[in-house]
Image (cartoon, coloured by chain):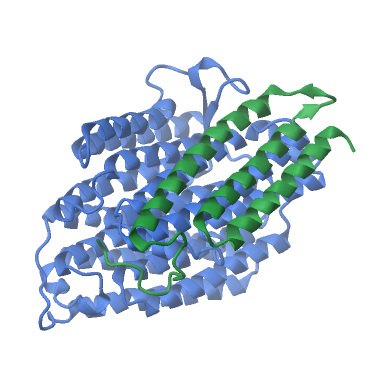
Chain colours: A green, B blue
Amino acid sequence: MNAALLYALAGVVLFAVGVAGLLALPHLLRKILAFNILGSGAFLVLVGLGQRDGVVDPVPQAMVLTGIVVAIAATALALALARHLYERTGRMQLPESRGAEPESRDD
Amino acid sequence: MSSFFDPLPWLVMLPLVWGTIAFMLGAGRGARLAIVAIALQLLLALKLAGQMLEGGARSYAVGGWGAPLGIDLAADGLAAAMMLLTQAVALPLAVYARGYFAARPAGSALFWPITGYLLAALNALFLSADLFNIYVTLELLGLAAVGLVAIAGGKQPLAAAMRYLLATLLGSGAYLLGVALIYGAYGSVSLEVLHPLVAAEAPLAVMLAAVLMLLGLLLKTALFPFHFWLPPAHGGAPAPVSALLSALVVKASFYLVVRLWLELFAPLATPAAAQLIGLLGAAAILWGSWHALTQTRLKMLVAYSTVAQIGYLFLLFPLATPETAASAFQGGVMQAMAHGLAKAAMFAAAGSMIVATGRDDISHLGGVGVQLPLTLFTFGMAGVTLMGLPPSAGFSAKWLLLMAAVESGQWWWVMLMIGGGLLSAAYVFKVLRRAFLPVAEGDHVTPVPRVLEWSAFALALAAVVLGLYGEPLLQLLMVGRMA
């Protein structure tokens, strides 16, 4: 097993851990952290597979840099939403309701 | 041709610029600027479509750098058509939103800047020529859309926005992992470079990548059973936001599914996979229509109707057999256009009814038919498009899809489409029936500003006009088809 494959497999494992956390953990902060783990997994696959015969390919590095910026923006938005939700409900969890029930008044 | 006035980069730049200016102007400002700028964008999209009908597909190297160092923008007929739809829906909606927020200011503070960014993300997504740029624009689009859902600020909209955000992040995460695997296999993300490579040889990792990217996009398109986030997000937001999201945002990820399935991953797509995705579409039609019928809130009814109509879009894939590829493709995209215009009109009309009656409740719609005849007519006309009755664009779309189904001998999809049309009729008439009743005791229906009625009507009218004069659009769609 070469190094590239090892990185890629580790990335896939991280991604799977992130998906499991995002789906299974109820606490919003944990969900947001799980999203970051999931993203890091994908980045690791991108950088890991992006080296051929030990020569580093700069293009995936640039992509991951862009991806990190996107992930930070998404995390910031998620944290802001979670905080507002906490202020209004006193809980760091999504309410149980699903689409079928009346969700809100218009305003 | 890369003159200064090339429409390609300006279609991305303009909304970014006016969105930023609107942000700097302060809360709730920038409506007039937005309307003028979107009108300009519509002209640019028309110019681009005209150029392409004569000169074929277009591309543009941003800053003159060229891929892989810089970013290339590319437009074929499909991209140009989606951009036309985007600007054509956004313009009447911007006029509508200005009037709507004057009547109901809740959530107006950040509407204009976020809408600018949303339109920039949409146009950039349609113009993307590589898989990674698509990822970035998908994320931008998702973040802007979540922002729009959250602007109303109540407990339920915030929860809906949070759920939507988590769903959309999971979707783009899966998509990104797919991109990483593709880059690992081929060392490129350019659609043009990858196309022959995938056709030549596709290792297992690419198969996995295709499945991951597709699942991520289906989650973002809210195809059944991934639709759970859509009704609260679309039904809970202010009406102009619901209209933008239902008409345009879900179409962007659908556009990518079409692009990947019919072009990049066409060599990997099996008939069984196509039937499976068609089945999910069928389930979406039945499930969405049924839930639309059982809703008591008007906007939730329209939101569940979106779940159902998304199902029709995915009938494209089982119907696109080698002999019927062209008509299935044209029918599927025409359905996306028809639904975009009609659903924007329907949400806008629903918003006017809510402004007039002061509440979002179907059982209190009595009197709307007398007080807001034009709005009710708009709702009905949009309903005609959703049912797929002539002369609307919904009819053209379903006709093309029906032809493809008959020609490829798949009669079960014919039955589904006819049955689905009846179900749409049922939930549209549920609203119309209530609205024609007299005002109930204790209720009051106040008139709404005329601009709300007419801008919604323009959208519904556009869906009918597209049905009558759809020929140039179908021609445009075939410009630069790869597969």
State the image coordinates of residue B152 (x, y, percent, origin top left).
29, 54
Question: Residue at the spot x=55%, y=57% of the render?
Answer: B219
B381 or B120, which lies in front? B120
The answer to whether one can see residue B334 in this image is no
Q: Which residue in the rendered view is the most extreme toward the right?
A: A1
Quadrant the C terminus of chain A occupies: bottom left
Q: Would you identify the image quadrant in which residue A31 lies? A: bottom right
B304 or B102, which lies in front? B102
Q: Would you identify the image quadrant in which residue B372 lies? A: bottom left
Total numbered labels placed on residues in the image: 0
In this rendering, the answer to whether B302 lies above or below B293 is above
State the image coordinates of residue A46 (x, y, percent, origin top left).
70, 36
Q: Which residue in the rendered view is the most extreme toward the front?
A: A90
Quadrant the N terminus of chain A occupies: top right
B14 or B184, which lies in front? B184
Q: Which residue in the rendered view is the most extreme toward the bottom?
A: B441
Q: Is residue A43 left or right of residue B448?
A: right
Question: Residue at the spot x=32%, y=77% of the render?
Answer: B296
State the image coordinates of residue B397 (x, y, percent, origin top left).
46, 59
Question: Residue at the spot x=12%, y=55% of the render?
Answer: B450
The answer to whether one can see residue B58 in this image is yes
In this rendering, the answer to whether B248 lies above or below B481 is below
